Amino acid sequence: MNKCCAKTVNKITLLSVILAIVVAVSIVITAIFGVNFAATVNDNQTLTVTVNRYFYDNQLDKLESACDEEFAKQGLSVQYAYKGEMSGDECEIVYVFDKGANLTDAKAALKTAFAAKTADGGEWDGAFIEVATGKEVVETKIPVAYVVRAAIAVAVFAVLAFIYVALRYRLYMGLTTATSALLAAIVSAAVILLARIPVTTAMLYAVVVSSMLAAVFVMLTMNKLRANMDETDAEEKIISSIATKEIAAITAALGVALVLVGAIATWTVRWFAVCALIALLVAALIGLCFAPAMYLPLQKAADKKAANRTKSGYVGAVSEEKTAE
Amino acid sequence: MGKKKSVVLMVLLTIVIVVLCAITVVPAFPVPGTVQKWNPVVLQYDLGADLGGGYYAYYYPEGVISETEYNSNLAVLEGEEKTEYEEEYLQIEGSTLYFSKEDKLNIVSGDSLTDEFKNAFNAAAKEIAARYQAKGYSDYRVAVVDGYALRVELPASEPSDKASMAFSLLANTGDMTIEKGGEIVDELKSKDAKITDLIKNVSIATRYKTSFLQISFTAEGIEMLNTVKGELSASTDASSSSDTSSLTTLDIKVGEEILAQIYSDNIMDNNEVRTMFVDQINADYLKTIEILMDSVLKNGSYDITFTADAVRSFEPVFGENALTLLYIALAIVLVALLVVPVVKMGRFGVVSGYASLSYLIVTAMCFAFITGGTFEITLGSVLVFLFGLVLVNALQYYIYKAVKTEFDLGKTVESSVKGGYKKTLWGVIDIYSVLLLGSLAFLIGAAGVHTLALQALICVITGAFINLLWARAINFIYLSASKNKYKYFRFVREDDDDE
């Protein structure tokens, strides 16, 4: 994999353009088609079956089967359902459908079916069942304040990472770490939006964690770079320092874990696992390709500056012998 | 360290870890011979809506009822009464709700709804949604049902009593007033008087683990306080008196709800009022009051009254077993992280296994027992937990590689271990330092991101402790007890001069 990374280490312009295109296309697609919000935060239509507690506790399966049969007959697809339980006598099942679904016939058919079953001497004699439909328009799908504060948090993290790495290592290393962390969050969000993955507030978790992952991946490379500081050729130095195995190992382990979680768990968890997997891959890509490519010109510029200082008589960290070399 | 001592320590350590793991993950079961049930740590979390479901309630404006309620009421009526009831309500096209035609409610005009009602509803709905946002729930949903009712959802992490209180208080769209002994104070009696003439703002403060509401008054408000202070009862009277109706307090009300009572000793020397003292862990209750008061102070009242329908609880909407399935997946991941290191690193991999289990125990317990309410388990929590677990193992492998590199240079096992740990020390510290800074920065985030930051802090601190100290100590004990140190690390060297 190091060979692959070696090929991209000189391609900062190309990588920047590709990332910029991904972000730009994502913005355009989102502006045209809007955000693909998940069903749980989107507008919808509901069919509510209200029932007395005794019947709910003892015959819920039968009630659900009757509803499912009717929905199947009408060709309706239930997105999800709430089983709203009260401590009092009344419980309800709220079936949620797409906002364009036509529930009129299903409602009428269920009302007729339930009326027959709950009539005196009927199969469900004694049960009180009501059917109602409704349209729900969500006031706030994802609060803008939550997104803005998450963005500020990532920006502050980038600044703090820059300060820490610049103090501990070199200024340009700090710059590379901070840019990578910031970029990972931006590109992850862009790819998630571009891939039209159903979005909930949980997407923010994947995006912020992506910046942390990117920072860790870059730090692994920086650790190696510091150990290879004696190497004179900047390009050789960065290529030999990319922490390919470590980054690949973390990506593979976390990736497999997320695939497993996504494969076993329920719908919302599955889409979250997909978001997290995208964030992980973006962070790995940035750690393996973008960060080394960004580091190289910064290192060269720093080397040049140091050399110029030496030529002009300034003797700092670089010894005269090294300059002569 | 002597071999015997090492073996004893190993056995003790294993027993402690096994017991703690059992406390953490052994599934729930009824305790024989008692009515109690064993509940592991991982079943004691405050769960977000995706994993634990939550609560919901309907808000109907006064004079508006649901189709279900209308039909239920109609079903018990007959003849003329039924006709009269039918005539009392109007159903408009596109809505299944029923609207009262009662004149004083001013909802219906002819065959349509009045503009006043529509405007008041729309403005109030937006304000109520803003209040829930200010509360900072990780998952909440405020939806307008059929144009003129609301359905509000909260996550299961909120205890049911707090959820009921939030549903009730945040729907209050009434006017704010101050009453003394049941009478509106003189300063608010005139037509043009506003509550903002007296109260500047409301905030929550905490001193010595006690939280309270801090109400700042304007100059006019301070004058009013000074005038009435002498007539008010002291809070000590309230605690000693059985008949509180005889006490005189300054009551801050929104609508018909008394939000705060001010006693004479609640008025500080700096003319600020400190009231509603509660334990810090119950500050969430004050937060709801603060949000409501702040909302009314900034945006005033609305010409519409909502009735919060009964609160219903619901299971996760995509399946009741969301949490069980997630735990099965996490268990498989954990087992894989126990097995793979052993395969890759020999007995040093066993140390990684102990590190993984220690990480699981500490984070699982911290996630469960650090102040509830604000510390709910969301999908983000699962992600940071997994990230931390993988990182702990990756850094163990990073250390192992450094040890191996040292060994390949021809050093003894002991000096290779020493050199490996020494060479990776600052690298590991740097990684955890950056992650610590990240966790601190994410505290800026709102709602779920803020909670994720707190959980990330726990994961980072635990991970750092394990990689830098705990796993190193375990490795020291195990290595001391090991007969064949080469085998321990799966190292091979032909010229063996190590032992």
Image (spheres, coloured by chain):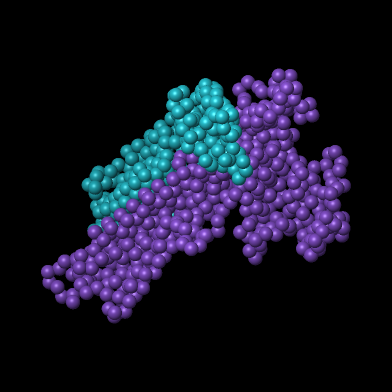
Chain colours: A cyan, B purple
* Horizontal side, residue B33 vs residue A250: left or right: right
The furthest residue to the front: A121
The furthest residue to the top: B111
| Rendered residue at 83%/57% (across/down) | B247
Nearer to us in this view, B470 or B234: B234
- Measuring from the top left, give residue B28's x and y in whole percent: 45, 56
Q: Quadrant of the C terminus of chain A?
A: bottom left
* Horizontal side, residue A225 vs residue A190: left or right: left
Q: Quadrant of residue B308?
A: top right
Residue B130 visible somewhere in the drawing: no
Relative vertical location of residue B120 with respect to residue A57 in this rendering, above or below:
above
* Horizontal side, residue B123 vs residue B367: left or right: right
- Measuring from the top left, give residue A236's x and y in whole percent: 24, 52
| Rendered residue at 28%/46% (across/down) | A9
- Measuring from the top left, give residue B177's x and y in whole percent: 79, 45
Q: Quadrant of residue B395?
A: bottom left
Relative vertical location of residue A312 with respect to residue A99 in this rendering, above or below:
below
| Rendered residue at 77%/44% (across/down) | B256
The furthest residue to the left: B494
Nearer to us in this view, A28 or A179: A28
| Rendered residue at 85%/57% (across/down) | B246
Nearer to us in this view, B213 or B309: B309
Nearer to us in this view, A210 or A254: A254
* Horizontal side, residue B150 vs residue B276: left or right: left
